[in-house]
Amino acid sequence: IENILEKEEVVEKVFEIREHSADIYDHCVNVCVLSILTSIKMNLPQNIIYDIGVGSLIHDLGLRYISVKYTDISIDTLSPDNLFEYKKHTVYGFSSVEKESWMSDIAKKVLLFHHERLDGSGFPLKLKNISMENRIVAVCDTFDELISGIGCERVKVQEAIEYLKTYRNIYFDGKVIDIFLDFIATYPSGTKVRTNEGEIGMVIGQNEHFTERPILRMLFNQEGKKFNDIGYYCD
């Protein structure tokens, strides 16, 4: 990421995104980090990881060229005209960097293809033969879109994970999903959860390779009685 931000042209594009929308800026940064982490865990070559990082950091650049509302709203509820306009953000983004010599073709295509899906249901070209770089960004982008409410209604982390699992090997590459979910916390620290026994606890840590089984500090038993710090019920 430090190497990416050393390039002045990248920084200029990032600031364009930030000036347009702080939410999209945060989303792009998140997708960049998640895509790089996934690429590293997949042992991709360093130059490919760099290109994925550049492309994912500015993948939604095209949103600055549209006026359609797309935050915390499902794009399926948009009128046909507005939906068509929203889907053009991939083309707008690609067109804005197509002739830039400082970006590789791999990075440029991330802007164009990050919404393509394996079954051909994506956009803008309804591709089925999708490169690994774009398969990675598609997973990371979808996950953060869901929890950020970009082009969809905002959902909880657990719901975003279930969505990815549901469309494993349908929309998204199953191998990428598995690697991605291996380091994503199903229940982030600070989340309150209910156990199978009906007790209430707060997540205070993660179990490596068992993301669905976090470390809990128990708060209340099944009857709503509070635990004290050493695990006994308080009177």
Image (cartoon, helix red, strand yellow):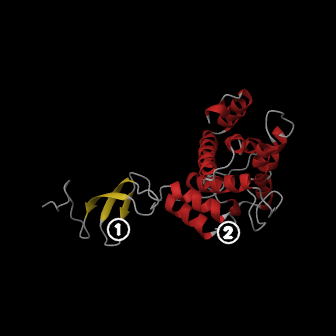
Q: Nearer the viewer, residue 216 or 42?
A: 42
- Residue occupied by mark 1: 195
Lateral position of residue 91 relative to residue 53, left or right: right
Sequence order check: which comes first, mark 1 or mark 2?
2
Name the residue located 52 percent from the left edge and 58 percent from the top edge: 182
Query: In the rendered image, which quarter contains the N terminus?
Result: top right
Query: In the rendered image, which quarter contains the C terminus?
Result: bottom left
**How many angstroms separate mark 1 from mark 2 (CA)?**
30 Å
Lateral position of residue 143 relative to residue 226, left or right: right
Q: Position of residue 115 (x, y in %)?
A: 73, 56
Report the disc number at residue 180.
none
Decide: is 109 above or below 171.
Answer: above
Name the residue located 70 percent from the left edge and 57 percent from the top edge: 135
Q: Amino acid at mark 2?
A: Asn
Q: Quadrant of residue 162?
A: bottom right
Name the residue located 68 percent from the left edge and 50 percent from the top edge: 69
- Residue occupied by mark 2: 169
Q: Position of residue 121 (x, y in %)?
A: 76, 66
Q: Quadrant of residue 217?
A: bottom left
Q: Nearer the viewer, residue 106 or 165?
A: 106
- Circle 2 Cα neighbour tier, 10 Å, few/some/many (<14 / 14–19 / ≥20): some
Lateral position of residue 203 relative to residue 128, left or right: left
Which mark's residue is nearer the viewer, 1 or 2? 2
Furthest residue toward left: 235
Q: Position of residue 199 (x, y in %)?
A: 29, 67
- Name the secondary structure under disc 1: loop
Q: Position of residue 53 (x, y in %)?
A: 67, 42
Answer yes or no: do the residues labelled 1 and 2 have beta carbons within 8 Å? Answer: no
